[in-house]
Amino acid sequence: MNKEMVQSLGINIQKVFMFVFMIGAGMASLGGMLLGPYSGVIYADMGMEFAILAFIVVVIGGMGSFTGSVMAAILVGLSGSFMAYYVPDLALAANMLLMAVVLIFRPQGLFGAKG
């Protein structure tokens, strides 16, 4: 939360940022390696549908809110599954509409802080 204070305690911030970036890149590459055999075809934007759903979850839940992300993930999963059962072509559209409704009434997200 406070880079200057942590740096004054003797922790090298640049090394911490580099380590966190390396861990994130490694996890992303591991996810790509595991998704390749599952989908059967490997192409450049093969995880884009998951990235769109993750973006919708973060926007609905509120930036920086873990509780909001969990609740939004449940809400998006249920609404997408419900729509995929009845009208499969509109499953992603229902999640986009849900995101638009949340943004109209609560621009900071369900559990996001104002400002």
Image: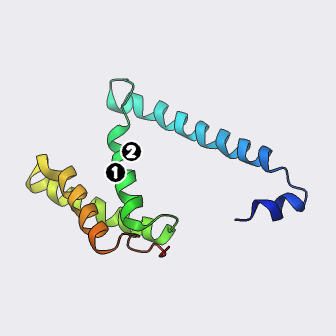
Residue 106 figure quarter: bottom left
Which circle marks residue 86 in the picture? none
Q: Quadrant of residue 109?
A: bottom left
What's the residue type where badge 2 is placed?
Ala
Residue at 24% across / 57% down in the picture? 95
Residue 28 locus on image (x, y percent):
53, 38
Q: Quadrant of the N terminus?
A: bottom right
State the SS at label 2.
helix
Image coordinates of residue 79 in percent, x first then y, are 22, 62
Residue at position x 72%, y 47% in the image: 17
- Residue 35 place in picture, x, y as percent: 41, 34
The residue closer to the viewer here, 51 or 70, is 51
Q: Give residue 115's position: percent from left, percent from top.
A: 50, 73
In the picture, measured across the screen, residue 21 lies left or right of residue 103, that is right
Residue 36 visible, this angle: yes
Q: Which mark is residue 51?
A: 2
Above or below, 44 against 16 in this view is above
Q: Name the residue under label 1.
A: 53
